[in-house]
Amino acid sequence: MAASSCIFCQIARSSTSTILLHQDHKVIAFQDINPSAFRHYLVIPIEHIPTVNDLHKRSEDYTLVSHMLNVGQTLLQRDAPQAKEYRFGFHQPPFNSIDHLHLHCLALPFIPRWRELKYSSLGPLGGFVEAGMLLERIKPSF
């Protein structure tokens, strides 16, 4: 998908009416339009990066994902401090819905409960990868 037709690129360029929860020079954050949990936010890079498969063991990618996670954690701690559990992660192809990297930030419980299945790892088949696991995968070697 060309970046010009990517809905997340349009949101990042402020070409939509989406209300931003956070904005800086690297990422933006907003509410998921189809929430699966008590609070469900998305943190996306402003730069168009299609999927987790486009991230590599580079300091730039590691720093970006770390920043995305930090933003998501800060937002949920601010907006859902009473949540008993948080979940942060990415869908891996072919299970991603939009080809623009996006971190799901969830303050549980899942609503409805069955949506937990969408945010589970499927082992070697992919599915959902927790942000911490992705960071381990792309951590640069020194």
Image: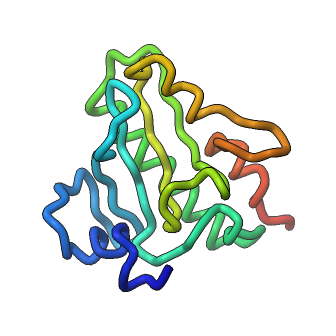
Residue at x-position 56% and y-position 35% = 118
Residue at x-position 33% and y-position 41% = 34
Q: Residue furthest left?
A: 17
User: Toward the viewer: 93 or 26?
Assistant: 93
Residue 123 point in image, percent of width and height: 81, 38
> In the figure, 56 relative to 78: above or below?
below
User: Toward the viewer: 1 or 25?
Assistant: 1
Residue 28 point in image, percent of width and height: 33, 61
User: Toward the viewer: 141 or 91?
Assistant: 91
Does 60 sit left or right of 81 as displayed? right
How is colour applied across the structure in the image?
A: rainbow
Residue at x-position 71% and y-position 35% = 121
Tell me the quarter of the picture where residue 59 sits. Answer: bottom right
Does 133 sit left or right of 8 as displayed? right
Counting the numbered discs, the total is: 0
Tell me the quarter of the picture where residue 20 sits. Answer: bottom left
Does 11 sit left or right of 2 as displayed? left
> In the figure, 121 relative to 91: above or below?
above
Does 87 sit left or right of 75 as displayed? right
Residue at x-position 34% and y-position 36% = 35
Residue 52 point in image, percent of width and height: 65, 61
Viewport quadrant of the C terminus: bottom right
Residue 77 point in image, percent of width and height: 35, 31
